[in-house]
Amino acid sequence: MISSRTLPSVICGTLHSVDQYLNIKLTDISVTDPEKYPHMLSVKNCFIRGSVVHYVQLPADEVDTQLLQDAARKEALQQKQ
């Protein structure tokens, strides 16, 4: 779930990618208030500029914390070298 200043209320979807500027690509999106934003019903994928995002909420059971910890360790080791 993503909330933004310029986006319709809240957008939910599958996180496809995030770049170094925190720009976000979502697939299979849906809007929480389709009556207010009917034009968004036909949109299936979107790119969201990182500077307009208020917050991102990820379901806890969908986050692989072990993978994140391993990646953080590898990056820390590379920075030491």
Image (spheres, helix red, strand yellow):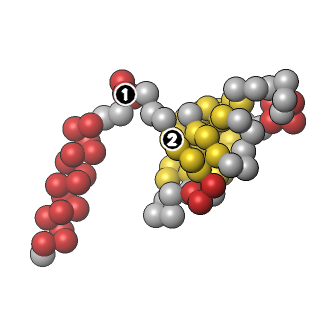
Which label sits on residue 60?
Answer: 1
- Residue type, mark 2 in image: Val
Q: Is residue 16 positioned above or below 39 on the image? A: below
Tag 1 near tag 2, CB within 8 Å:
no
Label 2: how many Cα within 10 Å (few below 14, some 14–19, many 20+): few
Image quadrant in which the C terminus is located? bottom left
Q: Is residue 67 positioned above or below 18 on the image? A: above
Which label sits on residue 8?
Answer: none
The residue where tag 2 is placed is 56
Query: Where is residue 5 drawn, in percent x and y?
Result: 68, 49
- Residue type, mark 1 in image: Ala
Q: Is 37 left, or right, of 80 in this rendering?
A: right
Q: Secondary structure at mark 1?
A: helix
Q: Is residue 79 positioned above or below 66 on the image? A: below
Cα distance in 3D space between marks 1 and 2: 12 Å
Label 1: how many Cα within 10 Å (few below 14, some 14–19, many 20+): few
The image quarter containing residue 35 is top right
